Image (cartoon, rainbow, N blue to C red):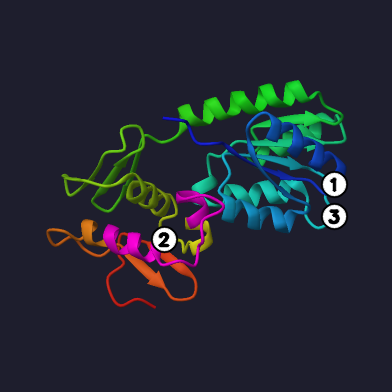
Amino acid sequence: MTPPVKKVLVVDDDESIARIVRDYLHEKGYDVTVADDGGKGIKAAEEVQPDIVILDVEMPDMTGFDVCKKIREMPSLRNTPIIMFTAHTAEDDELAGLKVGADDYLAKPFDFKELLARLRALLRRSKALRPQVIRSADVVLNTASHAVTRAGRPMSLTAKEYALLEFLMLNENRVVGREQIAQHVWDESFDAFSNVIDVYIKRLRAKLETGGGKRMIRTRRGEGYMLSADAEGADD
């Protein structure tokens, strides 16, 4: 089976650098999204759910430190590797970046081979550090074996049902939109407004609730879906 293409988010207001980094990483087989300011970067991080983020420190609307902190507050991106760029070589900047959750640091100008080497190393490390077990109430999901149980009972899920459940569990108690689900579980070309997502949510609900299991997935009309250990009651 061909491994999925890794998603890279580049947040940099310097259009020329962002374009060069995007083109270089595209050539190396990565799927690259570019945002030209901090606010767009935070929104793109939520929507794309990247495997790694490359983030410039100095931007006009928000500093890279602020963006990094916001990304680290997203449960699904808590362990996503972040590389920070700076035009300075000051040790204080590097320490500030690491303090808010950055994993690595490169001073401009940088060597593209070094960037690629660090990116690959961080992706390998993030895979190794990924939590093997995710729990919500009596649902246990093993990210290594893709085995899922509820109250100790094995659940039989398709690949898409598993990916949908994993994404919802990583974002427990947080509403995720249809576009976020489409991009994470399917791909960028998927039509987020088709009824396929509704069908999969319905199937997943039915499997979770087999045998009298309490409801866990709630629909927030006009917003998306939320998984919670206590999602009983009518949809909003």
First reached walking from the N terminus: tag 3 or tag 1:
1
Q: Depth check: 158 or 47 in front?
A: 158
Q: Depth check: 133 or 19 in front?
A: 19
Tell me which amino acid carries mark 3.
Pro
Quarter occupied by residue 52: top right
Quarter occupied by residue 215: bottom left
Q: Which residue is mark 3?
A: 60
* Label annotation for residue 15: 1
* 125 lies left or right of 96: left
Q: Residues within 10 Å of mark 1 (few under 14, many from 20)?
A: few
Q: Residue at x 58, y 56 (%)?
A: 47
Between marks 3 and 1, how big is the CA–CA gap? 13 Å
Between marks 3 and 2, how big is the CA–CA gap? 32 Å
Q: Which residue is mark 2?
A: 173
Mark 1 secondary-structure assignment: helix
Q: Depth check: 219 or 33 in front?
A: 33
Stretch of the chain drawn in magenta? 182-204
Q: Is residue 50 above or below residue 129?
A: below
